[in-house]
């Protein structure tokens, strides 16, 4: 398929999804089991025994962001979502930046999830008594080994994503059912039988040790919620665009419930030292404390399923975002080629998998999995906060007239998104300053502030460089004031089944 001239029959995606499919994709992208199994331990290392407080506090601005996504999607469903909405309501430069950082952040996320998947598999192998292969001692904490195993899985899920988003959604639905049954069972049992007394102080954000710990904890928690917007990246493939909004909000509320359940259960069963000390192996340790084998392995199996589904759910929305950008000719034509057989951006999906594989290999410069996770989460958390904030501001600008017409609607459509955006921008800025002032030299280490700040800075600067290339070299119509984009073509909303 060749790239067609601007405004002439742009490529379109096959409409085949309903609200349940959207929930499956968004929930898999958010990956509650992975966030609980890994994220809670990492976050506890920052905020101590205040996981429920930080999860509730982070939910408030994310809820405002979700409302902005939902309202924008209602008036303009587009696979590019924030990239298109910010470009039209604010400026194409910031719109392109939103699209770019989402791509780069997801590729980085895929690289780290690749290692997480490999780690879960190696832990399972250890539980089954397999500790060596060809004389090599298996180490679930080794980034090299976990990445090698995870890359094999990444290749498999990428090929599955190519064959159709409906097939991928079905697979993710079954994986989610297993994950949630295991999570609810173990967390419920942990809450009832845990040796550590329940305390209301767990819900007190003012008891968190310092302002910098609060900021970093919030950023880590925002990262846990990241992914609900995957429902909006398939909004051109759902039969009714409103289903994408429903799927996104259902996913977000479900995640809040699971994160609160998991955080309370973990703190009932594990001490603060045990929580912070087991990081990437937190869920396996939690299972071992509650049951004997083979039942104790079930949380680890759930973590593996979550990581596999998350890999696939990361590939799908990224390919759709790049499809939308290519359709506007801000990226090359290969990203908007749609497979005649599957109705998906097959070439782009394959390339996303290849890029994630390359980044996963580069991540080997950080030898320990826990360090790699912390470095990735901090970097991605800052750019995700920026992307969410800009999208919320786009909604506030687009619907600002509601403040005069209906003050109730104005509060929901303008005030709440604006407050959410301000909170996330302030959070990212404060954490960036904390990283900058925490050291006086640069080294490739997960606890070096300059390295943690350099990574998101490179993501953002590279976005402006790529935008300049799209504007002046590709001469994309996306940057023409008042000209709109290829996505304006009416054929998009009349895509064939």
Image (cartoon, grey):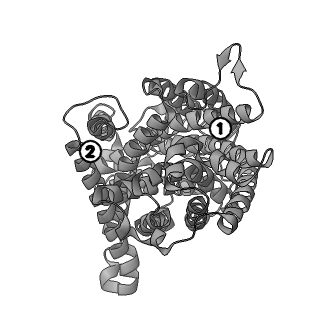
Judged left or right of residue 417, residue 259 is: right
> Where's the N terminus, which quadrant?
top right
Q: Is residue 475 above or below residue 279?
A: above
Judged left or right of residue 378, residue 320 is: right
Where is residue 241 drawn, in percent x and y?
58, 63
Where is residue 19 drawn, in percent x and y?
66, 63
Q: Earlier in the sequence, mark 2 or mark 1?
A: 1
Residue 102, disc = none
Q: Which residue is mark 1?
A: 120
Asked if the residue under mark 1 is in contact with the one under mark 2, i.e. CB atoms within 8 Å, the reply is no
| Residue 343 falls in image quadrant | top right
| Residue 65 falls in image quadrant | bottom left
Q: Secondary structure at mark 2?
A: helix
Residue at coordinates 57% horizontally, 40% vertically from top-left?
A: 315
Judging depth in this view, the residue of 360 and 283 nearest the camera is: 283
Judging depth in this view, the residue of 445 and 11 nearest the camera is: 445
Residue at coordinates 70% horizontally, 38% vertically from top-left?
A: 163
Residue at coordinates 31% horizontally, 64% vertically from top-left?
A: 423
Q: Residues within 10 Å of mark 1 (few under 14, many from 20)?
A: many
Q: Secondary structure at mark 1?
A: helix
Judged left or right of residue 441, residue 207 is: right
| Residue 391 falls in image quadrant | bottom left
Where is residue 457 drawn, in percent x and y?
28, 39
Q: Is residue 239 above or below residue 315?
A: below
Judged left or right of residue 414, residue 78 is: right
Q: Which residue is mark 2?
A: 435
Asked whether the viewer can see residue 475, the reply is no
Q: Residues within 10 Å of mark 2 (few under 14, many from 20)?
A: some
């Amino acid at each position: 398929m060749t790239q067609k001239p601007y405004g002439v029959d742009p490529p379109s995606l096959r409409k085949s999804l309903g609200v349940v499919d959207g929930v499956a994709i968004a929930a898999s992208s958010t990956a509650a089991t992975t966030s609980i199994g890994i994220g809670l331990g990492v976050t506890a290392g920052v905020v101590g025994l205040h996981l429920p407080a930080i999860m509730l506090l982070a939910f408030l601005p994310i809820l405002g962001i979700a409302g902005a996504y939902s309202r924008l999607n209602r008036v303009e469903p587009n696979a590019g979502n924030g990239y298109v909405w910010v470009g039209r309501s604010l400026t194409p430069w910031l719109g392109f930046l939103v699209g770019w950082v989402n791509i780069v952040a997801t590729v980085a996320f895929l690289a780290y999830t690749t290692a997480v998947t490999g780690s879960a598999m190696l832990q399972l192998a250890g539980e089954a008594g397999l500790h060596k292969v060809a004389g090599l001692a298996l180490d679930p904490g080794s980034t090299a080994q976990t990445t090698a195993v995870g890359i094999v899985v990444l290749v498999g899920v990428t090929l599955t994503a190519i064959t159709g988003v409906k097939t991928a959604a079905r697979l993710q639905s079954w994986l989610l059912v297993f994950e949630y049954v295991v999570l609810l069972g173990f967390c419920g049992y942990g809450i009832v039988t845990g040796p550590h007394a329940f305390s209301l102080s767990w819900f007190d954000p003012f008891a968190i040790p310092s302002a910098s710990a609060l900021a970093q904890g919030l950023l880590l928690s925002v990262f846990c919620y990241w992914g609900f917007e995957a429902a909006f990246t398939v909004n051109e493939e759902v039969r009714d665009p409103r289903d994408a909004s429903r799927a996104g909000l259902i996913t977000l509320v479900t995640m809040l419930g699971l994160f609160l359940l998991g955080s309370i259960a973990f703190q009932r069963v594990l001490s603060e030292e045990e929580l912070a000390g087991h990081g990437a192996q937190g869920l396996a340790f939690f299972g071992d404390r509650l049951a004997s084998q083979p039942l104790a392995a079930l949380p680890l199996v759930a973590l593996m399923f979550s990581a596999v589904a998350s890999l696939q759910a990361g590939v799908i929305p990224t390919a759709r975002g790049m499809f939308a950008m290519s359709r506007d000719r801000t990226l090359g034509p290969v990203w908007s080629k749609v497979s005649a057989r599957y109705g998906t951006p097959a070439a782009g999906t394959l390339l996303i998998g290849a890029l994630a594989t390359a980044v996963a290999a580069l991540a080997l410069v950080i030898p320990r999995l826990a360090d790699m996770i912390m470095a990735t989460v901090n970097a991605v958390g800052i750019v995700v906060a920026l992307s969410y904030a800009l999208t919320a501001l786009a909604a506030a600008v687009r619907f600002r007239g509601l403040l005069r017409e209906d003050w109730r609607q104005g509060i929901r459509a303008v005030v709440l998104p604006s407050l959410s955006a301000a909170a996330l921008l302030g959070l990212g800025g404060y954490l960036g300053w904390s990283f900058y002032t925490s050291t006086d030299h640069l080294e490739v280490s997960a606890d070096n502030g300059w390295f943690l700040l350099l990574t998101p800075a490179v993501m953002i600067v590279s976005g402006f460089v790529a935008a300049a290339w799209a504007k002046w070299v590709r001469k994309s119509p996306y940057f023409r004031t008042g000209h709109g984009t290829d996505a304006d073509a009416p054929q998009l909303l009349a895509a064939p089944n």
